[in-house]
Structures are given as C-alpha cells and as structure tokens.
C-alpha cells in the first residue's frame, strides 16, 4: 500500500530546512510507454546506445543555446539559490537545491566538454554519465517545476529551468520520456487539447454554459465556437471548459466580451492554450502545438488573438508566438506574413485577457459592482510563468499590477501576502512544469509548503478566504493540495471568476 501523503508542518520561521539526504531519491514520475513516445516522434524506449546519443545531444544543445553553456560554466557555488526552491523547502532533499540540481548536469558537462574534466575528473567534480546518473537526472529533473525562482536570486542569473528543459530534451531524445507530459502532447496533436475533449463535447459544454448563465442572470451571454469573421479568437486552457474553478473564469471572459459588445469565438482546432512542448524543452513540439493557433486564426479570419488564464500558455504566447506563428511580428514565412496582415495592429498581438478586461474597466466600457464579492477577503497568487517569464501592458511590472488592479476594481477586500512570496519572488504552486500528475502528489504537496505558509499567515491575520490566480495549473494544483493544509479547496479561483460575480451585464 502507498505511504500516506502528509503536508509538512508549518514552520515558525521561514528558514532553510535541516537537510534529509536522499529523501526524494526514489520519487520517480511514470515513464512514457512505447505508444506515447512513438506518437510524438520520440524513440519508444531507452535506446541501446543511450550514452553516446545523450552526450551527442548535450553537445548539440551546448552549441545551439549559448545560455545553456554559460549556465554550465558560470556557477561559483555561492549558495545564494540553495534555499530558494519550494521543493527543497518542502522535501529537505539537498538534491532539490537549485545548485545541486544544476550540478547533476554540470558534473557530466565537465567530464565530456572541458579539458580539466577530461584529464582530472575527480578534482573538478566531473562524473561519467552512468545509468545511475541517468536515473538521477530523470528523477530530479522531474522534481523541478521550471519556475525560475532560483534565477532571481542568482548573481549570475543562472536559470535552472533552462537546465531542466535541456535535461528533459536529452532524456526524450534517448527514449526516456515522462508519461504525463508526453501523453498530453500526443492528445493536443490528435484532438486539439490537453484533455482530449473532441469538438462535439466542447460544443455541448458551451451550450450548457449558455443555459446556466441565462438561468443565473436572465441574459443571453454567448459562448461561440468556430465563428468565422469574429473579431477576437480566444485561446484558453482546456481546463476552463469543465474543471472547477476554471469554468467560472471562462464565464467571466464571456461576460466581459458580452458587456463590451466584442464579437469573439473559441476554436475547436485550437482548443488549448497550454503548450507542454516548453516543459520538455523541445522546440519542434513547442512549434507544432503553437501552429494550431495560427491555423485557427487564419481559418476564422479574426482580427485579434487573446489568451485566457494560463501561466505557461501566456509565457509561450508572450515570448514565442511572434517568431513561431506570426501572432505578433518576427516570423517571415508566408503564412505568418499573411496572419500579420490580417490582424489588427491597433491592438497588441497577442493580448492577455487581463489586459483586455483592465483596458475596458479603465475606459469605463464595462462596470463592476464590487459589493458582489463582499463575501470574499481576497489575496493574489502570482503564477511563476506570468511573473518571471512574461509581461503585460505597456509598463514594467504590468504582469503584477494588472491582475491586482482588476481584483481591486471587482472587490472591496484585498490583502497582499508577505513580501518575498509575491511578484517576481513568488513561490510556485508546486504543480507546474509538467508535474501536475497524481504519481507526483507527494512532491506536489510538499512543494506547496511555502505558498501555503504565506496563505496561512494572511488567513490568520486578515481572515483571507479566497486566493485568486490566473493560471490553470495553479488552480488545479491548489484545488488538490489545499485540503492537505487544512483549507477548503474552493479557497482558490480565477481573477475572472471575481469579474464574473461583479460585472454589470445590462440595466437591471
Ligand atoms: S526553477 Fe524553480 S523548481 Fe526548478 S530548481 Fe529553480 S526554484 Fe526549484
Ligand atoms: S546562486 Fe547562481 S552562482 Fe550561486 S550557487 Fe546558485 S546557481 Fe551557482
């Protein structure tokens, strides 16, 4: 029988934990089977010549990504990052210190790609890539959510997330992939979204939502799909179509478009904002998944592309869609150029739904009744990929301020969590980066500790009973782990859930 999963006790002071070497050494996420691997073009199982192919792949990545090589060379082992990872804080396993995670890769880099490592391996901490080391890579590079918090504290800006992505890319190239992420990528290629929801099921769900909103408000708020000639194409995480509390934010987006009189549509072809290609560090997968958005935008002839509440999706959209797809300028292939001509450049392309909503609030196009959220005392959880991987609006720090501005416009009671746990120093929810799988639940519960501590503090001091966020993964992760820390699972919800409660849809 599996051991009972327990949340670590809240700490009196937020100090580094006493280390427990090897405590997470056996935590191994399920390995992808042959069918899953082959479906996305990876070797079906660990190849016989895995050692040579892994080293060759590492060499390829070192020559392709300058940052990866710099990260391998630049660390001075100052230790500034060592206690900054939520997984180290929650598990106390020293290999979950960011510097130690990096060293799993760096030791192999030194052995094969540096002269001292080739000549005097022991003196410079260089190691052969053995099967034992490979398994250690698999286990510990799947205990990093690629949240980038450690990089904020590194004097050299070394980004462990990129090292984790490189490790996963190498592992996939030799047939040692993760079941959870690779299965999801396969579903997106085949069906169009992470959940494998086919078009008809999507249409049914949206019709049901129209009926629910009509019943609740008396107003016909539409949830359109595949409407040619709509102004806005909304790309949102598929969890928004049926998961709780995600669906309440989808209702909020629909109400915003309705109240502002903006024609919009969803797409059955691009029914997923998430892009797990980034989590596994694979450019080809990242591109292929993003390309569905371009195809949908071209097919539907939309003028704007807007992204719903999803952290890593927004990072991919904000940072990569321009050169990958032509949503934004940068790509020069004919379809990208065609799309750039089609889109309306009076608007940013793409836009986050929070940018759309905040602009409408500021211009008084939509109005909110704050009292509708008076039962909530609200705090805000910055999601990693929004906080440390993107921006919003035209001002520095817009990704922090715009969601908070919307909450303050939609509600009377707002409280910040402690400094050092928010904005660019925010703690990961514990389930990002391809780790939102039940076979890693123990890690996820432990990794949530610092965020749960910060939430617990504002609950005790200010009576906070609602934590808003704009990430589908954070919502799913918190819904699962909140009860382990004594909270109601409904404590978490979306920013547009609050907007949905407060927005005026017409004269009463
Ligand atoms: S990127 Fe995040 S999860 Fe990974 S080592 Fe750094 S702090 Fe930990
Ligand atoms: S903070 Fe940067 S330089 Fe210091 S140990 Fe961590 S990764 Fe190395």
Image (tube, grey):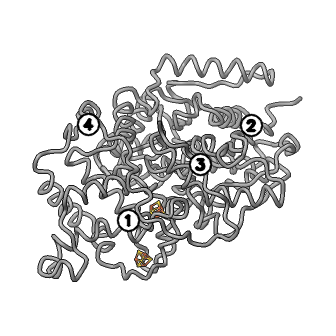
* Separation (CA) of disc 3 from disc 2: 35 Å
Disc 2 within 8 angstroms of ligand 1 (CB)? no
Q: Is residue 405 left or right of residue 119?
A: right
Image location of residue 36, percent across then percent down: 29, 33
Which disc is residue 197 wearing? none
Decide: few, some or many residues near mark 1? Use Cα within 10 Å; few <14, some 14-19, many ≥20.
many
Q: Is residue 101 above or below residue 381?
A: below
What residue appears at the point 47 percent right and 65 percent down from the top-left corner?
A: 20
Per the image, label 1 sits on a secondary structure element best described as: helix
Task: Name the residue tied to disc 1.
Answer: 101
In front of the other: label 3 or label 2? 3
Asked if the residue at label 1 sits under 8 Å from ligand 1, the reply is yes
Q: How crowded is the residue under tag 4: few (<14 C-alpha within 10 Å), some, or many (20+)?
A: many
Asked whether 244 or 249 is in front, the reply is 244
The dot on residue 500 is: 2
Residue 291 visible at all: no
Q: Which residue is mark 4?
A: 37
Task: Tell me the residue that label 3 is attached to.
Answer: 6
The residue at the point 22 percent across, 83 percent down is 123
Q: Nearer the viewer, residue 359 or 499?
A: 499
């Amino acid at each position: 029988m599996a051991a009972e999963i327990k949340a670590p006790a809240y700490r009196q002071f937020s100090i580094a934990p006493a280390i427990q070497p090897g405590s997470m050494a056996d935590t191994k996420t399920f390995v992808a089977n042959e069918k899953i691997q082959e479906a996305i073009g990876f070797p079906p199982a660990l190849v016989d010549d895995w050692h040579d192919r892994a080293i060759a792949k590492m060499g390829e990545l070192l020559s392709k990504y300058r940052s990866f090589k710099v990260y391998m060379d630049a660390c001075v082992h100052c230790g500034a990052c060592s206690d900054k990872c939520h997984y180290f804080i929650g598990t106390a396993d020293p290999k979950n210190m960011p510097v130690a995670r990096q060293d799993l890769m760096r030791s192999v880099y030194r052995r094969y790609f540096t002269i001292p490592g080739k000549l005097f391996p022991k003196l410079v901490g260089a190691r052969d890539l053995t099967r034992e080391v490979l398994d250690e890579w698999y286990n510990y590079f799947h205990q990093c959510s690629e949240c980038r918090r450690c990089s904020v504290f590194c004097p050299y800006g070394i980004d462990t997330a990129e090292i984790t992505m490189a490790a996963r890319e190498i592992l996939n190239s030799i047939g040692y992939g993760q079941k959870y992420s690779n299965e999801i990528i396969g579903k997106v290629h085949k069906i169009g979204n992470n959940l494998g929801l086919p078009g008809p099921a999507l249409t049914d769900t949206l019709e049901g939502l129209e009926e629910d909103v009509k019943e609740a408000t008396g107003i016909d708020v539409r949830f359109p799909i595949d409407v040619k000639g709509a102004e806005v194409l909304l790309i949102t995480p598929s969890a928004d179509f049926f998961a709780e509390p995600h669906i309440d934010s989808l209702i909020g987006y629909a109400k915003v478009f309705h109240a502002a009189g903006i024609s919009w549509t969803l797409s059955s072809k691009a029914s997923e904002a998430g892009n797990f290609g980034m989590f596994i560090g694979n450019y080809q997968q990242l591109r292929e998944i993003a390309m569905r958005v371009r195809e949908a935008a071209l097919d539907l002839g939309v003028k704007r592309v807007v992204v719903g509440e999803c952290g890593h999706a927004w990072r991919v959209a904000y940072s990569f869609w321009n050169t990958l797809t032509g949503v934004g300028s940068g790509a020069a292939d004919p379809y990208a150029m065609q799309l750039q001509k089609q889109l309306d450049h009076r608007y940013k392309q793409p836009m986050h739904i929070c940018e759309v909503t905040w602009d409408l609030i500021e211009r008084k196009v939509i109005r909110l009744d704050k009292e509708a959220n008076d039962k909530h005392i609200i705090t805000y959880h910055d999601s990693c990929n929004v906080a440390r991987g993107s921006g919003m609006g035209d001002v520095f720090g817009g990704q922090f301020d715009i969601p908070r501005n919307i909450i303050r416009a939609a509600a009377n009671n707002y409280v910040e969590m402690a400094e050092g746990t928010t904005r660019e120093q925010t703690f990961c929810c514990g389930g990002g980066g391809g780790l939102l799988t039940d076979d890693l639940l123990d890690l996820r519960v432990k990794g949530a500790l610092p965020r749960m501590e910060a939430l617990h503090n504002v609950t005790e001091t200010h009576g906070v009973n609602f934590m808003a966020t704009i990430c589908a993964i954070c919502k799913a992760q918190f819904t699962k782990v909140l009860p382990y820390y004594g909270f109601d699972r409904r404590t978490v919800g979306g920013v547009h859930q609050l907007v949905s409660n407060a927005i005026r849809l017409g004269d009463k």
